Amino acid sequence: MSGETTPASRINALEEAAQSLSVHLKKSSGILTANQRLGVAICARDALNCSGCNAALRDGLCHLTLYGFCKDIKHETTCPGTGDKNIELTLTTIVHSLVCFQSKINDGWYRDCIKAILSCGLLSNYAKEIECQDEKELQVAAHAVFCEIVIIAAWSHGIHSTFLALDAVDTMPSLPTFEDMKSAPNPMHINFSSLLKRVRQDDSIALAPYFNKDDINYKSKEYTDIGEDVWKEMNYGPVPYLCFRFVPKDLVPFARWLRISYLTVGEMLLSWGDLDKTRHCASVTRHDVETIASAVAGQKNCDF
């Protein structure tokens, strides 16, 4: 965009960017099937109005073991299209946790998610195709599935929340149907033992596994299959992308959406400067942003 952004041009930019998820879901990506990915996207939008989660929030029932707590809630909406009750329960629990109980997420929740992914059957086809040799390979694959779920859920929920805030849900790009997904390709099933020379684990940096640019095997088939264009756009900086590089074909387009919908890093780090008027409406002042950020931080106790 050039010149000063107006509310109309801003909404138009968001509508165009929001189309990206619907297009992307019909492409091959990680380990989840096409129907499972669509189910996650649908569930992320429905979860916001889940009567079970809302009742738990009102009653203050959420406790430290978030995964188990959320798993036991009688959710009004679940993750469709999974074809398996155990997989449906795992995906539903993770997505509802993300959408409705974000402030309660902690390291215990992450570990419980990984355990559930390992035991529910999500990795069965992957393990057979890749011929996983040990538990470490499965742990890395489970983390990759976790990344895939989180990105799709955050992407879909982010679009939904944006258009709710704009009072423009009627113009929000719709998700594909399960009929549309019949033509979607099979999962890529990336062999991480081939793609990566090293998987790093350092709790002082991140609880989850991660890898750096130097850890990639550039001669591997997986590197070629993912595509040079994707790797060129990959963010190799620190958090928040550090642990999500295991799903590069999801991370890169998701990051494009974030660049349109969120403040840039530079804007977030400015003390009291004006927002970039080529990206944000001139009527939104820095004071407005700071006020909202302060209110959210105070409510969530996140030390922002």
Image (tube, rainbow, N blue to C red):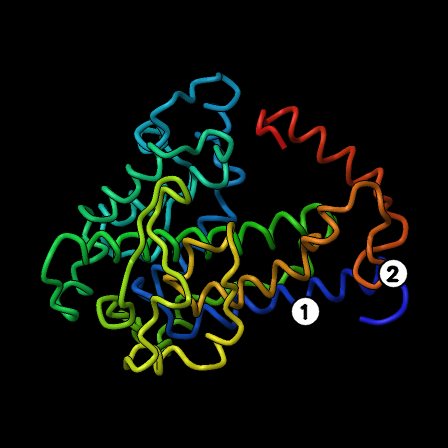
The image position of residue 302, as x and y in percent, is: 57, 29
Amino acid carrying label 1: it is Glu
Q: Residue at x 32, y 57 (%)?
A: 144
**Residue annotated with mark 2:** 6
The image position of residue 34, as x and y in percent, is: 35, 67
- Quadrant in which the N terminus appears: bottom right
Q: Residue at x 34, y 59 (%)?
A: 36
Q: Residues within 10 Å of mark 2 (few under 14, many from 20)?
A: some
Q: How many discs appear?
A: 2
Q: Quick check: 267 left or right of 301?
A: right
- Quadrant in which the C terminus appears: top right
Q: Residue 16: which disc?
A: 1
Q: Quick check: 32 left or right of 270?
A: left
Q: Nearer the viewer, residue 300 or 221?
A: 221
Q: CA gap, disc 2 to disc 1?
A: 15 Å
Q: Is residue 41 above or below residue 61?
A: below
The disc, 2 or 1, on the residue closer to the chain's N-terminal end is: 2
